[in-house]
Image (cartoon, helix red, strand yellow):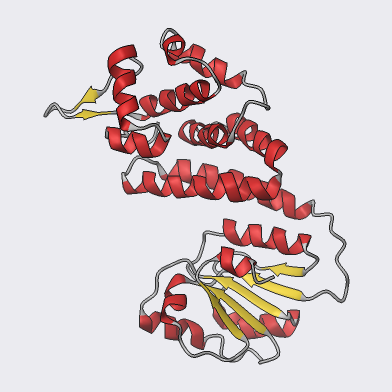
Amino acid sequence: MGVVAKYSIKELEVLTGIRAATLRMWEKRYGIIKPLRTQTNIRYYGNEHLKLLLNVNILNRNGIKISHIAKMSSIEIAEKVKDLSFVKTGDDDLFDGLMLSMIDLDETLFHQAFYKAVARLGFEDTINRIIFPFFSRIGIMWQVDTINPAQEHFISNMVRQKLIAAIDNATTKISASAKKVLMFLPENELHELGMLFLNYLLKNKGYRTIYLGQAVPLTDLAKILEISDPDILVTNASNSMSIGDVTTFLNKFKFVPASKKVFISNAAIYEEQPELPSNFKIFENLKGLAAEF
C-alpha cells in the first residue's frame, strides 16, 4: 500500500537482517521469493516480498526449517507467526513485528509486538532496544524511497501514545521540593518521541517536569520562565544548523539567569563547541543528555 516499493536485494538485506547470499539461496533452492523485473529487466522486490521475508525470518529463527516454511502459503506463514509464544519471541522478532505493522498500518499487530516486548524487556528497555533502533531502520526506508509518510506517521503516533500513557501512569512519588525541569522543542522541531521518553525517565527519577511540547517559540521563553521558575531547561534541536544558525539559536537563551541550568541537545552545536556561560551544557544527542540526570 502507499508508495510502490522497489527494493534491491542489498536493501532487503538491510531491512530484514538476512544476508543477500542467504536470500539468493532461498530463492533458488526453495522458491521462497520470486523477484519482479523492470521494463529493462532489472530485478527488484516489493513490499509483499519484504513482508513475507520478515515472517519467514521470524519462523526460521524460532526453529522451523526453511524447507518446511517453503511448503507453506504466505497466509499460513503469517498465521504461524501470530501463534508464536511470548517465550520464543526475541528482539529481532519483535522488531520485525513492528515493521510488519507499519507496512500494513496494522494497529493490532503493533500492540501485539509492543506488549510482547514490554512483557519480556520492560518499558524502558523496549524503547531503547527495540523502538529507537526501529526508527533508525525507518530512516533507511526513507533513503530508498519505500515508505509512505502515512506509514511513518502511523508508527510514530502509536509509539507516542505508549509514551504518553507511560508518563501518565508513572508511580514515583515526587517531592514538592524536587528539582523542576522545563522541557520543550524549539521552533520547527516536531519530532518529540525522544523528549517524551526523557520526560518519562525524569518523572521516574523523581523530578518535577513541565513539558511544553513541539515548536515552542523561543520569543515566549522569558515569560514561560517567569511563570514556571524551573531549575533546569532542556531542549532538543535535531535539525541541522549552520554556524550562523547556531549563534542565532544560542542568543535566544542569553537572558536565562545563571542560577538556572540550560541543557541543549544538538549535534551541530556540540561539534562547534561555542563559548557559553557556565550554566550551559551542550550534548550531541538526547541519550547523552539523559545520562546527566
* Image-quadrant location for residue 180: bottom right
Out of 65 and 141, give the one closest to the viewer: 65
> Residue at the location (29% across, 24% down)?
24
> Residue at the location (42% across, 74% down)?
268
User: Quadrant of the image for the C terminus?
Assistant: bottom right
| Residue 291 placement, left or right of 40 | right
Q: Where does residue 157 sit, x and y in percent of width and height?
A: 57, 47
> Residue at the location (38% across, 25% down)?
48
Q: Where does residue 266 sit, x and y in percent of width and height?
A: 49, 72
> Residue at the location (50% across, 45% down)?
134
Q: Where does residue 66 sit, x and y in percent of width and height?
A: 43, 15
| Residue 127 placement, left or right of 92 | right
Out of 147 and 170, give the one closest to the viewer: 170
| Residue 279 placement, left or right of 25 | right
User: Quadrant of the image for the N terminus?
Assistant: top left
Q: Where does residue 9 sit, x and y in percent of width and height?
A: 28, 32
Picture mark count: 0
* Image-quadrant location for residue 185: bottom right
Out of 168 and 18, give the one closest to the viewer: 18
Q: Quick check: can you spot residue 82?
A: yes
- Rendered position, 30 above or below 240: above
